[in-house]
Amino acid sequence: MAQDDKPLLIKRYASRRLYNTETSDYVTLEDIAGFIRAGREVQIVDLKSGDDLTRQYLLQIIAEHESRGENVLPLDVLTDLVRSYTTQAQSVVPQFLAMSFEMLRDGQSHIVENMTRANPMAAMPGFEEMQRQQQAFMKTMMAGWPPVAGVADKDDDKSASEELSDIKRQLAELQSKLSGLDK
């Protein structure tokens, strides 16, 4: 279990082959994607220079999935990402994306929790099957996404209105930052 606490170190040789230092064997991009889906952090470094190549390889994995028709990123999002590299907005985009994915992971746990709570529709014929299908769908959609440490415990005590207030506050902060970039 201690191995899962630190990133899996993958070394790239001059031949561009990727070497898993834990299992002492060569791996493919698809293998690395599988490690990540299983919740494992990875770090890919160039053997000779020691440069961290993780970002480059993660982008390559995403590009390969997108090119195979496994479209997760809508075209307008991709366009905005490209645009953010050429404008001052790039300073806000990484923070915004990180917060968005954190909210998505948190929302996943709340949706699953709400589906399992007792509710008046439970008496409806076929409700249990529908609930099972919804849970399977959510599990598939969020497969490999590790939970955000401490977020679920902290937010369980919040009411829906408090959560909405937090989201509004965060959105106002982002709008303020974006407005500052236009000047």
Image (cartoon, rainbow, N blue to C red):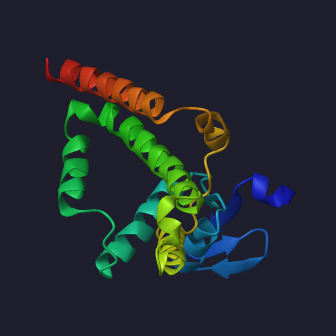
Q: From this view, report whether residue 54 is shown above or below residue 156.
A: below
Residue occupying the point 30% across, 23% down = 172
Q: Quadrant of residue 94?
A: top left
Q: Quadrant of residue 4?
A: bottom right
Residue occupying the point 30% across, 63% down = 73
Residue 59 in sight here = yes
Picture coordinates of residue 13, whole percent (x, y): 61, 70
Pick the residue in front: 178 or 135. 135
Picture coordinates of residue 78, whole percent (x, y): 24, 57
Pick the residue in front: 118 or 19. 118
Residue 53 in sight here = no
Residue occupying the point 24% across, 42% down = 84
Picture coordinates of residue 11, whole percent (x, y): 65, 65
Quarter the N terminus occupies: bottom right
Residue 145 left/right relative to 174: right
Picture coordinates of residue 19, whole percent (x, y): 67, 73
Quarter the C terminus occupies: top left
Residue occupying the point 40% across, 44% down = 100
Q: From this view, report whether residue 28 is shown above or below residue 144.
A: below
Q: From this view, report whether residue 105 is shown above or below residue 134.
A: above
